[in-house]
Image (spheres, rainbow, N blue to C red):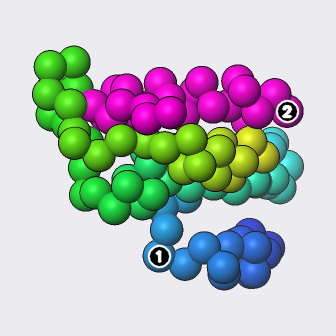
Amino acid sequence: MMDFINPFNEKTKDLMGKNLTVHISVFDDKSMDWRVVGVPTDDLIREALKIEKGSGKPNSEKLPEKLTAAQLNSIAEAKAKDMNTEDIEAVKKMVLGTARSMGIEFQN
């Protein structure tokens, strides 16, 4: 167990207090492999806009806060290392989709 705990603590010490997604694979020989996927996109959006939560009715009730191009770029760059693409425009579309599902509009 310490073969997991010590490396995990070392790799995530700079991320204390943040929500993380971790993918863990356990093999038949009881060895394991893991990787930190990072902070969820909705958490990054809420942090950038300084809001506690998204809209309860995102299709009809939009939040007054709008996601700016600079915030979108920053979030997309942070998420790019977690995605299976190096196409930053594709990552931006994913971030915008998450924002829409939270009732947040994009401001050019």
In the image, what residue occupies the spot 81% across and 28% down?
87
**Residue 57 location (% of width, % of height):** 15, 26
Label pair 2/1, CB-CB below 8 angstroms = no
Question: What residue appears at the point 49 percent right and 68 percent down from the top-left corner?
Answer: 18
Q: What is the span of residues highlighted in magenta in the rendered image?
A: 82-108
Label 1 is placed on what type of residue?
Gly
Q: On the image, numbered disc 1 is attached to which residue?
A: 17
Q: Identify the image quadrant of residue 102.
A: top left
Q: Which of the pair 21/7 is nearer the observer?
A: 21
Does residue 24 sit above or below 19 in this rendering? above
Q: Is residue 53 left or right of residue 76?
A: left
- Observer able to see residue 66: yes
Task: Give the answer, above or below, for where 53 lies relative to 96.
Answer: below
Give the residue drawn at x 74%, y 42%.
80
Q: Which amino acid type is marked by label 2? A: Glu
12 within the magenta span: no
The residue sitting at 15% across, 34% down in the picture is: 56
Please identify the quarter of the rendering in which residue 58 is found: top left
Picture quarter with the N terminus: bottom right
Extreme residue in the top direction:
59
Toward the front, the furthest residue is 108
Give the answer, above or below, for where 91 lies relative to 35: above
Q: CA distance from mark 2 to mark 1?
A: 28 Å
Pointer 2 residue: 86
Element class at badge 1 = loop
